[in-house]
């Protein structure tokens, strides 16, 4: 049994471009080979709390120094990390909010990027502790990316690459759906590009996972 985890962050429910393309990718990966299960983590429908004082305190303690209260404070984080660990393929779909990730996705990142658990600090820098696996991100933007004044800065894609690589997920393939607020022709062009991209993703996932994928 193979598992795909789809983490989505748009507040726009089923109308979301990024979630729709993420679901299409999840469906296509599952259809390409029988035996896939898709787990959905909708961060807008079920928002995560921002890390509070208990989480911060527990996170800073070595595991053997944590008591029941600290372990309880990290229980949600452990469950979210376990979802990633159980996944053969990770799909993240997200809108761009003010040039970067929406706060809903940032909260998920804060729960899953943890010292001593998903990365460790070494003299050579941070080292990811999760096994690498194919990861795909669909980013939807209202406008165009690129040089100003026509385009806008993209702090989302480099950030997402960096933070996922920090925990060991370095194979991130990103699709940006641009100009989604600029009329049906732009939307149709982005959706067509997404279908082409999806075919490459399926091939990449199959190659990475080997026979039976
Ligand atoms: C709070 C907020 C901030 C936004 N900031 C940006 C932005 O910085 N750049 C941009 O191109 N679009 C921005 N948008 C527009 C969305 O990124 C765009 O509508 C996107 O297509 C939504 O994706 P979705 O359909 O998956 O929700 C913003 C939208 C909201 C609600």
Image (tube, rainbow, N blue to C red):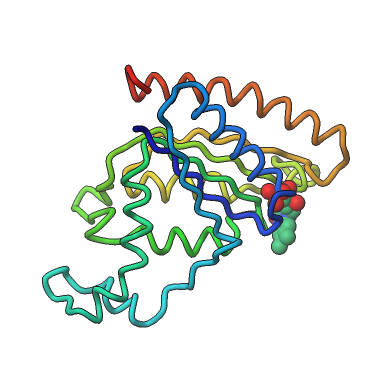
Q: In the rendered image, which quarter contains the N terminus?
A: top left
- Left/right placement of residue 126 relative to residue 27 reads left
The residue nearer to you, when weighing 203 against 34, is 34
- Residue 45 in which image quadrant: bottom right
- Residue 33 in which image quadrant: top left
Q: Residue 44 in the image: state x and y as whole percent.
A: 60, 61
Q: Residue 5 in the image: state x and y as whole percent.
A: 45, 44
- Left/right placement of residue 143 relative to residue 71 reads right
What residue is rendered at 58% in x and 26% in y? 198
The residue nearer to you, when weighing 157 against 58, is 58
In the displayed structure, 189 sits above or below 47; it is above
- Left/right placement of residue 70 relative to residue 90 reads left
In the displayed structure, 210 sits above or below 67; it is above
- Residue 24 in which image quadrant: top right
- Left/right placement of residue 103 relative to residue 55 reads right
Q: Residue 116 in the image: state x and y as whole percent.
A: 22, 60
What residue is rendered at 79% in x and 46% in y? 149
Q: In the rendered image, which quarter contains the C terminus?
A: top left
What residue is rendered at 36% in x and 58% in y? 113
What residue is rendered at 43% in x and 32% in y? 36
In the displayed structure, 91 sits above or below 100; it is above
In the displayed structure, 186 sits above or below 80; it is above
Q: Residue 169 in the image: state x and y as whole percent.
A: 36, 41
The residue nearer to you, when weighing 162 against 123, is 162
């Amino acid at each position: 049994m193979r598992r795909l985890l789809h983490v989505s962050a748009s507040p726009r429910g089923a109308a979301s471009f990024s979630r729709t393309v993420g679901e299409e990718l999840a469906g296509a990966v599952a259809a390409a080979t029988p035996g896939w299960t898709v787990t959905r983590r909708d961060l807008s429908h079920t928002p995560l709390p921002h890390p509070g004082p208990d989480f911060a305190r527990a996170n800073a303690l070595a595991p053997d120094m944590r008591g029941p209260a600290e372990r309880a404070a990290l229980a949600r984080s452990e469950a979210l990390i376990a979802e990633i660990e159980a996944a053969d393929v990770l799909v993240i779909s997200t809108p761009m909010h003010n040039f970067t990730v929406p706060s809903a996705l940032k909260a998920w990142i804060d729960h899953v990027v943890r010292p001593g658990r998903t990365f460790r600090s070494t003299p050579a820098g941070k080292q990811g502790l999760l096994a690498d696996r194919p990861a795909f991100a669909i980013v939807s933007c209202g406008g165009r990316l690129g040089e100003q004044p026509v385009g806008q800065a993209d702090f989302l894609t480099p950030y997402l690459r960096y933070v996922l690589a920090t925990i060991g997920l370095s194979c991130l393939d990103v699709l940006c759906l641009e100009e989604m607020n600029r009329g049906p022709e732009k939307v149709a062009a982005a959706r067509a590009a997404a279908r082409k991209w999806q075919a490459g993703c399926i091939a990449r996932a199959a190659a990475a996972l080997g026979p039976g994928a």
